[in-house]
Image: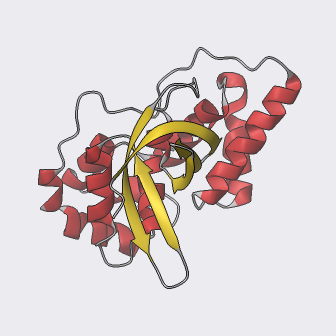
Amino acid sequence: MIGRLVGYICEKQPPALMIDVNGVGYEVLAPMSTFYELPADQNEKVVLYTHLSVREDAHQLFAFSDLLQRKLFRILIKVNGVGPKLALAILSGMSVSEFVSAVKHGDSAMLVRLPGVGKKTAERLLIEMADKVRDVQAPSTDVELNQPSSIQPSSSNDRAQMIEDALSALVALGYKPAEAEKCVKNVGVEAGSSQELIRLALQLMVKK
């Protein structure tokens, strides 16, 4: 079992990452909540906590910036009807503290705005997670989706690439292409990087 990776980012295409660990590249999938905490400098070492998902047709490694995110991910995939892909989308659409708050307040409306979460799944999450979220206490440093960005793209080509990367990430997380494109368009020029654009689009879709 691979539980932790310490290395350097050599590729980044949300929700996928490649981490160079002593010359070995590990391909991982990470929620956007983890991407928001990654260093901008690829020469800076990162520490990611991982979960290995083994299926008949694939072995997938999921990575998280802290143990709390991984703990919630592991609890989520035990819920009937929630697989790793949906758990990844949930952790991308809201922070740990936001998810805990939604469950504690029985806010199914917020949950159904996440891709792949229908009314029945939302109700199942509220019921099955009611007792389990007591063990998931979000730290005060939890990253919120509306955190501002001071980075601005330098050219129209950079912005086009930023939009393309954001759309690709949102579709990979389970949103329909038309829905993703509409939300990215609505965000407009507020974002200064692809990660910020994804953050704002997710905020718009989850809280609209």
94 with respect to 115 (left or right): left
Q: Nearer the viewer, residue 23 or 166?
A: 23
Q: Nearer the viewer, residue 81 or 102?
A: 81
Residue at 26% x, 54% y is 71
156 with respect to 59 (left or right): right
Residue at 24% x, 28% y is 140
Does the rendering let one see residue 113? Answer: no
Q: Nearer the viewer, residue 207 or 140?
A: 140
| Screen quadrant of the N terminus | bottom left
Query: Where in the figure is residue 45, as x and y percent of width and height?
Result: 46, 30
Outermost residue to the front: 22
Is the residue 28 above or below the residue 196 in the image?
below
Colouring scheme applied when the structure was drawn:
secondary structure
Residue 195: which quarter of the image?
top right
Is the residue 139 above or below the residue 14 in the image?
above
77 with respect to 88 (left or right): left
